[in-house]
Image (tube, rainbow, N blue to C red):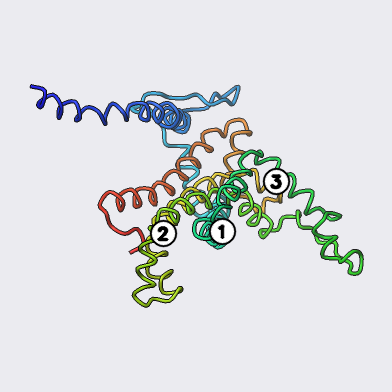
Amino acid sequence: MAEAAGPRGARWLWPLLAVPGMVWLGLLFIAPMYVVLAILFGGVDPILRQPVPVWNPVDWDVAQFRYVWDHVVGAQPFFRPALVRTVVYVGLASAMCLLIAYPVAYFTARFAGRWKGPLLFALIAPFWISYMMRMLAWVNLLQTDGLVNRTLSAGGVFDVHENWLGGRPSTVVLGLVYGYVPYMILPLFAGLDRIPVATLEAARDLGASRWETFRRITWRLSRPAVVVSLLVTSLPMLGDYFTNDLLSGSPDTSMIGNLINNSVLTPGQTGQAGAFVLLILLVSIVPMLVYVRSTRTGTDVQS
């Protein structure tokens, strides 16, 4: 009887351990997402211009989503430029984050030695400072009379008065890189630190050079961590609006997050904000499902 109870108890153990996570997911993701859908497919009060959620899916109206969709792919696609800019900005910023984060994570995992702890502390330190404060520091640096222009002018030798905050896409992309690169370093470090040193030593003993060892062993084994770090970094960027507001403020550099924020603040357009949120969800869920499927089936993420 004891032996029979053991497997039966083990069968219920893992579902019970998953209950807190499922409750957390339900309260903080599924329920809020359903509220967004109820507002998106609901109505608008004709007098107060406030959203009127419709909780019964049978009564949902797709008019607001159709309006947004028609102005993304239709004859008057005035929402499309912001969506394209979002994809371009997030792609460039994610690639730059990877170029910066991978060498830092690789050095910390392989060569830091007794300095690994202080270096990890330094990498985690930016999380203790609010994102707004870090962006405001960039505003001070990039002002016309800020430190960047004074450095470029070499103490007054050259006349440099660049308006870095005047709607430059490069400023927005660099701001995204600065704000989100810590999110990429830590997953990369975790993946690189788990690679067995004995595997690398075996490759060197078999005659592989340092570059071949990195290309054939380290890079291949770290590719799942690269995919995770790209997801962790790029997904929050898709909804970012604060960076553009502080470092540009120009509609020529607006992203989909700015469309969401403006729609929420405009009476009668809250449903449009829900449509933009749904578009972000549909775009972001594809790479997440691909990664989850590849990890469950044991296939290589990048093969």
Identity, as a three-letter code, of the amino acid under mark 1: Val
Identify the residue shown where x is 39% and y is 76%. Answer: 208
Marking on residue 104: 1
Disc 1 to disc 2, C-alpha distance: 14 Å
Tag 1 secondary structure: helix
Horizontal relation, residue 105 to residue 152: left or right: left
Q: Is residue 251 visible?
A: yes
- Residue 51, horizontal then vertical, whole percent: 53, 26
Identity, as a three-letter code, of the amino acid under mark 3: Met
Disc 3 to disc 1, C-alpha distance: 22 Å
Marking on residue 135: 3
Identify the residue shown where x is 49% and y is 40%. Answer: 277
Horizontal relation, residue 254 to residue 156: left or right: left
Q: Earlier in the sequence, mark 2 or mark 3?
A: 3
The residue indicated by pointer 2 is 222
Q: Which label lies toward us, 3 or 1?
A: 1
Identity, as a three-letter code, of the amino acid under mark 2: Ser
Q: Earlier in the sequence, mark 3 or mark 1?
A: 1
Disc 2 to disc 3, C-alpha distance: 31 Å
Identify the residue shown where x is 61% and y is 41%. Answer: 127
Q: Which label lies toward us, 2 or 3?
A: 2
Mark 3 nearby-residue class (10 Å; few <14, some 14–19, many ≥20) = many
Horizontal relation, residue 298 to residue 249: left or right: left
